[in-house]
Image: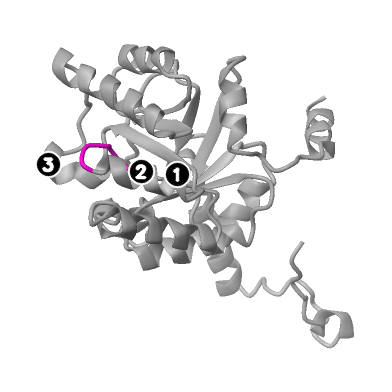
């Protein structure tokens, strides 16, 4: 039965998801799945999955480059990762984060960065908060580049927020987040990420706007969910409390490394005992599929 289900999914011919699908999925309550991805190898795996869309997040600065926050993600870094992901992805919407300060300098500078991300392969961009850069959001959308908003815990503002804390717990801040969500919708955003806010607040926002809400640490009543790939695969020892680990990827990979090391040390590799066999001497040619 399980094999049959896999075959059924594999046999499906998927067309490329479109930005308009975010609106269409919200109406009947069809949930949207999104996962972060930053490189070609992982993007290939996600491309062949049933995940709806990909986020090339500025979290690449942390997950791929070892920095302690997302503010270290530069435009050059983001362009590099978007281009790598695009080379593997044909049927998913690719959303790319606008890096720190890139949309605060001027609307013109924001449009230029958004355009560069689009040329690299992004179908849409995501930016955090709205106060002070409403015009930038408007100009980007008017330029033909779809925009996803991001409210609640906004990592690029982590120094001002005083750490990774739940936002919107009191009435004043909750109302501000609701107000900002409505502003983003009015400006023309097609979706909003709601990060680390109370579930009741996330549900209230979801009901108050006609665009899709994507939650992360925001309860189950949003229109979709996003996870950081490394958290989902269990590659880190201390993931956020809201992140669900689907496999113990770190342990599996470590075991594979150690098994390889053991077989090398014990002379068990290569497995083909006939080193003079012509077939064993042929180099495997890796081809893109």
* Relative depth, front residue between 208 and 52: 208
Report the residue marked by disc 1. Answer: 141
Nearer the N terminus, badge 3 or badge 2?
2
Task: Please state the horizontal and vertical placement of residue 119, each as a whole percent of the image.
Answer: 53, 62
| Of the two numbered discs 3 and 1 in the rendering, the one whose residue sits closer to the viewer | 1
Q: Secondary structure at mark 3?
A: helix
Query: Is residue 95 depicted above or below 205 in this figure?
Result: below
**Magenta-colored span:** 128-132
- The chief SS type of the magenta part is loop
- Which element type, helix, strand or loop, lies under badge 1? helix
- Residue closest to the eye, 136 or 251: 136
Mark 1 crowdedness (10 Å alpha carbons): few <14, some 14-19, many ≥20: many
Farthest residue toward the right? 278
The part of the image, by quadrant, that contains residue 22 is top right
- Badges 2 and 1: C-beta atoms under 8 Å apart? yes
Q: Residue at x 61, y 68 (%)?
A: 263
* Picture disc at residue 160: 3
Image quarter of the C terminus = bottom right
Q: Residues within 10 Å of mark 2 (few under 14, many from 20)?
A: many
| Image position, residue 167 (x, y; %) | 22, 26
Where is residue 90? Give x, y as percent.
68, 52
Front residue of 271 and 87: 87
Report which residue position mark 2 lands on: 137
Mark 2–mark 1 distance (CA, rounded to whole Å): 6 Å
Q: Quadrant of the N terminus?
A: top right
Query: Closest to the observer: 189 or 37?
Result: 189
Residue drawn at point x = 59 percent, y = 16 percent: 27
Q: Is residue 130 magenta?
A: yes
Q: Which quadrant holds residue 179?
A: top left
Q: Which mark is residue 51?
A: none
């Amino acid at each position: 039965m399980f094999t049959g289900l896999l075959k059924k999914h594999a046999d499906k011919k998927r067309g490329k998801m479109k930005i308009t699908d975010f609106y269409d999925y919200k109406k009947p309550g069809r949930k949207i799945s999104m996962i972060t991805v930053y490189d070609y190898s992982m993007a290939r795996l996600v491309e062949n999955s049933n995940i709806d869309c990909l986020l090339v997040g500025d979290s690449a600065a942390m997950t791929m480059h070892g920095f302690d926050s997302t503010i270290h993600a530069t435009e050059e870094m983001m362009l590099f990762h978007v281009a790598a992901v695009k080379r593997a992805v044909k049927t998913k919407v690719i959303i790319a984060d606008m890096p720190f300060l890139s949309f605060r300098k001027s609307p013109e500078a924001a449009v230029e960065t958004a355009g560069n991300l689009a040329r690299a392969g992004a179908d849409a961009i995501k930016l955090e908060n709205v106060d002070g850069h409403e015009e930038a959001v408007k100009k980007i959308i008017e330029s033909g580049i779809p925009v996803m908003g991001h409210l609640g815990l906004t990592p690029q503002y982590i120094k001002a927020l005083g750490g990774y804390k739940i936002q919107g717990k009191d009435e004043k801040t909750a109302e501000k987040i609701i107000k900002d969500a409505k502003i983003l919708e009015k400006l023309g955003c097609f979706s909003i990420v709601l990060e680390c806010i109370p579930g009741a607040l996330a549900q209230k926002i979801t009901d108050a706007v006609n665009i899709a809400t994507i939650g992360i640490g925001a309860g189950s009543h949003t229109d979709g969910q996003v996870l950081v790939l490394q958290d989902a695969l269990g590659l880190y020892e201390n993931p956020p409390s809201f992140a669900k680990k689907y496999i113990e990827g770190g342990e599996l990979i470590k075991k594979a490394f150690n098994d390889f090391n053991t077989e090398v040390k014990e002379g068990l590799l290569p497995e083909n005992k006939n080193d003079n066999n012509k077939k064993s001497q042929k180099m495997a040619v890796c081809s893109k599929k």
